[in-house]
Image (cartoon, grey):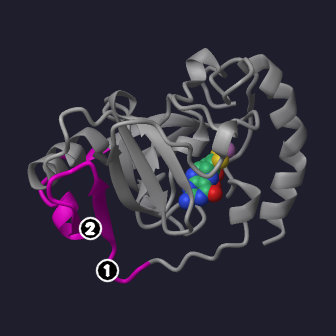
Amino acid sequence: MVEGRKLPPGQHAAELERFGLPQFARRDVATPAHPVLTVSGVVRHPTQLDLEDLLDGLPHHEQRSDLHCVTTWSALGLVWSGVRLSDVAQRISEVVCPHPRARWLMATGLDGFRSCLKLDDALADDVMIATCLDGVALSQAHGSPLRLVAPAQYGYKSVKHLIALEYRLSYAAGSAGFKEHPRGRVGREERSRLFPGPVWRRMWAGALPTVRRRYRAV
Ligand SMILES: Nc1nc2c(c(=O)[nH]1)N[C@H]1C(S)=C(S)[C@@H](COP(=O)(O)O)O[C@H]1N2
Ligand SMILES: [Mo]
């Protein structure tokens, strides 16, 4: 266990390894030569920003945080660097003019994985767009060239290979459907919809060995 880090209820410590929904295990994402971020939804001027323009001049941000997968494993003390999503969102907002009642942000990865975050949660101080992990450029396994990092939310909100953000008035389920909780707050054990967290804990833990095997087999 990494010194001084606490495990939330129902989680156990594990090494970080490539993971996700089973249907994405075999999607082989080729890192684009000229990465762009598409911004759409309830905005006046949908746009595409290339990576360099997006990051240019924004304050560099580095943090140590944990990744809590809903299937009960947690990777502790990961050092991410990049920029804060709130700084990116401010820059984007000036360009796209989101609707004043936009409350949700749908994030999409190049593999087609999607997850929707509450805008308030997405703008928290520890939510970032990471380009590096543990001091080196993000690997393909962990979401190159850009990934969302939302440490207070279950791992399914931390979309890898980020290519698009869509401003929304209301929540829409992402790739995990009803198994994804709209807020996904780890501190409240919001693992999934319909049943309380501790009920899901066992179901998710039961699915873990199969999903892990699927990812390790790639
Ligand atoms: N693009 C994409 N992002 C994703 C996923 C995925 O399958 N595709 N899986 C999510 C889940 S469920 C988890 S737990 C983490 C795993 O991150 P890792 O592969 O870096 O361990 O990525 C999240 N982001
Ligand atoms: Mo996960």
Report if the beta carbon of the residue with label 1 is closer than 8 angstroms to ligand 1. Answer: no
- At x 39%, y 52%, the residue is 130
Q: Residue 201: within the magenta?
A: no
* Quarter of the figure with the N terminus: top right
Kindly check if marks 1 and 2 are in contact, taking CB atoms under 8 A apart as contact: yes
Q: Quadrant of residue 216?
A: bottom right
- Residue 162 position within the rendered picture, expressed as x and y whole percent measured from the top left: 43, 60
Q: Which residue is mark 2?
A: 51
Q: Quadrant of residue 20?
A: bottom right
- Residue 99 position within the rendered picture, expressed as x and y whole percent measured from the top left: 19, 41
Q: Cα distance, mark 1 to mark 2?
A: 7 Å
Write down the region rendered in magenta. 32-61
User: Does any portion of residue 116 appear in the rendered image?
Assistant: yes
Q: Residues within 10 Å of mark 2 (few under 14, many from 20)?
A: some
Secondary structure found at label 2: helix
- Residue 124 position within the rendered picture, expressed as x and y whole percent measured from the top left: 33, 29
- At x 59%, y 41%, the residue is 155
- Mark carried by residue 34: 1
Q: Is residue 53 above or below residue 201?
A: below
Amino acid marked by disc 2: Leu
- At x 46%, y 37%, the residue is 171
Which of these two is toward me, 92 or 140? 92
On screen, residue 193 versus residue 216, left or right, reads: left
Q: Is residue 25 above or below residue 86?
A: below
Name which of mark 1 and mark 2 comes first in the sequence. 1
- Residue 58 position within the rendered picture, expressed as x and y whole percent measured from the top left: 16, 50
Q: Quadrant of residue 104?
A: top left
Q: Residues within 10 Å of mark 1 (few under 14, many from 20)?
A: few
Which of these two is toward me, 141 or 162? 162
Secondary structure found at label 1: loop
Amino acid marked by disc 1: His
On screen, residue 91 versus residue 116, left or right, reads: left
